[in-house]
Image (spheres, rainbow, N blue to C red):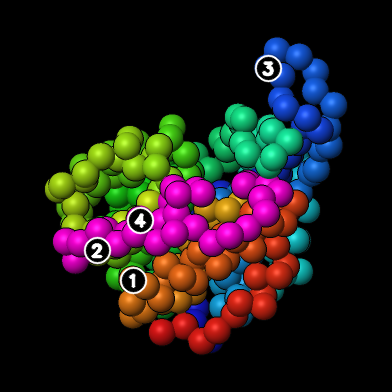
Amino acid sequence: MRKICVIGGANVDITATSAAAFQIGDSNPGSVVVSWGGVGRNIAHNLALLGDNVELITIFGGGVFGPVIANSCKELGIGISHSEIAKEGTNSFFISINNADGELVGGVADMNATEAMTPEWLQTRIDAINAADAVVADANSSAAALAWLIDNCQKPLYLDAVSVAKAARIKEAVAMSRKKAFFALKSNALEHQVLGQLNEAVIERIYVSRGAEGLQVYAQGKLYEFAALPCIVKNVTGGGDALLAGIVHAGPKASVEESAKMGLLCARCAVESPNAVSEDIAKLARPAL
C-alpha cells in the first residue's frame, strides 16, 4: 500500500443543478445538494477508495462545519493528524451552479481558511510530507507556500491548478522557487492557457484535461492525446479531482499511457455520479507501479 500525502482544501460543497436550461438573472427550479468536498479532500477521498494510505494536510474552516468535515475524513480512513481546525470566522465553501446536463455554469469559492497554510506552517509538517511515497498539492495554498513545497518536497510532487483564478499561483510559485522542478502538473484547458508554457520549470509530465475532447499529456518532449471515455454525464464537479487521483494512484513509475488510462477511468466514474466523489471508484483499485 502506497502512502500519499495530500495538501490542499477541504470544504463544504453546495451544488445547485437546474431542472431545465439555466436562465441567467432568474430563479431556476432545480435541486441542491450539500456535501463535503474541496479539491484536496476530494483527491484524498478518491485515493482512499482506491486503497492508498492517505494523509490529508489542511486547515478546516471554523464554525460548525470544520469539525464535521474533519470527522468525515476520519470515517473514510483518511489521516488528518497534521491538519487543524481554524478559529470561528474562517470559511471553506464552494458553491457551484450546474446546467441541467451537469455542466458547470459558474461557481464561487470562499477558501480563506487555507490562507494560513504558509511556508512556516508547512515547515512544521515537512517530516510527514517527505515520509510519503508521493505528494499532491492543490493551488488553494498561496504561491509562497507552493514555491516552498517545490523546493522542499523530496518525493514526486503533483500540483493541481484548481481554477483559472488560482492557476496563476502555480506560475508565480515557479518564478519564486529555487529548484523550479517537480514531477507533474494537472490542469484543464482554460487553466493551461493561464499557466502558459512555464519554460523555466522542469516538469516531467503535464496533464491537460479537455473534458469531452479527452486528455493531453506533455512528457519527454512529446504530446500524447487520449480520447475521453464514453459516459453519461450527471455532474462534472469532481471529475478533475478523480482524474488526478487516478494518475497519482497509477504511480510515477507508470507509463504515460497507464497513468492516463487510470485517470480517465476514475474521471468517468466521477462524472457519471451525482456526487463529487463516486464510491464506485473503489472498484477500479489496482496495485500501483
Residue identified by numbered label 2 = 219
Amino acid under label 3? Ile
Amino acid under label 2? Ala
Residue identified by numbered label 4 = 216
- For the magenta stretch, what is the residue range? 209-237
Residue identified by numbered label 3 = 24
Residue drawn at x 64%, y 63% as measured from the top left: 269
In-front residue for pair 95/224: 224
**Sequence-earlier tag: 3 or 1:** 3
Residue drawn at x 79%, y 44% as measured from the top left: 34
Mark 2 and mark 4 in contact? Answer it, CB < 8 Å.
no
Residue drawn at x 49%, y 71% as measured from the top left: 262
Whole-percent x, y for residue 121 in the image: 45, 52
- Structural distance between the alpha carbons of marks 2 and 4: 10 Å
In-front residue for pair 24/63: 24
Mark 2 residue crowding within 10 angstroms, few (<14) / some (14–19) / many (20+): some
Q: Report if residue 124 lies within the magenta region.
A: no
**Sequence-earlier tag: 3 or 4:** 3
